[in-house]
Image (tube, rainbow, N blue to C red):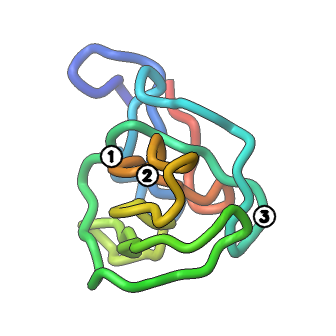
């Protein structure tokens, strides 16, 4: 599969191979999510956001929206909308995508 907009590598939905994030937007590989390891990205593409909800996570309370693939509707992770802890504000607007739900493409 060719790169997205000439930029390689990128990450795609494991179920349908739709591109969901660029390697250039990867911030961290050290997150933990429902199904194990997860990556944090500054941006995501070809996604649909679920309703905003309060969620208690390991590092505190947040408003988040679940993230789904826009092509196959597979659950991918979540987007941080708001942090209740000022030390965690850097996460706002960021996307956490489950490692088990994506593939690295070149």
Mark 2 or 1, closer to the camera: 2
x and y, in percent, of residue 61 in the image: 56, 73
Q: Quadrant of residue 4?
A: top left
Q: As drawn, is 5 to the left or to the right of 99? A: left
x and y, in percent, of residue 47 in the image: 27, 61
Which residue is the site of mark 3? 36
Q: Are marks 3 and 1 in contact (CB under 8 Å)?
A: no
Q: As drawn, is 65 to the left or to the right of 103? A: left
x and y, in percent, of residue 105 in the image: 51, 33
Asked which secondary structure carries label 2, the reply is strand
Q: As drawn, is 11 to the left or to the right of 37? A: left
Which residue is the site of mark 1? 44
Residue 95 - label: 2
Mark 3 or 2, closer to the camera: 2
**Quick one: label 2, few (<14), some, or many (20+) residues within 10 Å?**
many
Does 35 appear above or below 9?
below
Compare residues 57 and 18 and report the one nearer the observer.
Answer: 57
Residue that appears at 38% across and 51% down: 92
**Quick one: label 3, few (<14), some, or many (20+) residues within 10 Å?**
few
Asked which secondary structure carries label 3, the reply is strand
Compare residues 52 and 15 and report the one nearer the observer.
Answer: 52
Q: Earlier in the sequence, mark 2 or mark 1?
A: 1
């Amino acid at each position: 599969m060719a790169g997205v907009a000439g930029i390689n590598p990128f990450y795609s939905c494991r179920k349908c191979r739709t591109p969901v994030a660029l390697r250039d937007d990867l911030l961290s590989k050290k997150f933990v999510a429902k199904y194990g390891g997860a990556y944090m990205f500054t941006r995501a593409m070809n996604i649909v956001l679920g309703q905003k909800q309060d969620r208690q996570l390991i590092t505190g309370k947040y408003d988040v929206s679940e993230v789904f693939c826009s092509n196959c509707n597979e659950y991918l992770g979540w987007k941080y909308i708001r942090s209740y802890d000022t030390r965690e504000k850097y996460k706002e607007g960021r996307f956490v995508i489950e490692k088990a739900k994506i593939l690295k493409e070149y």
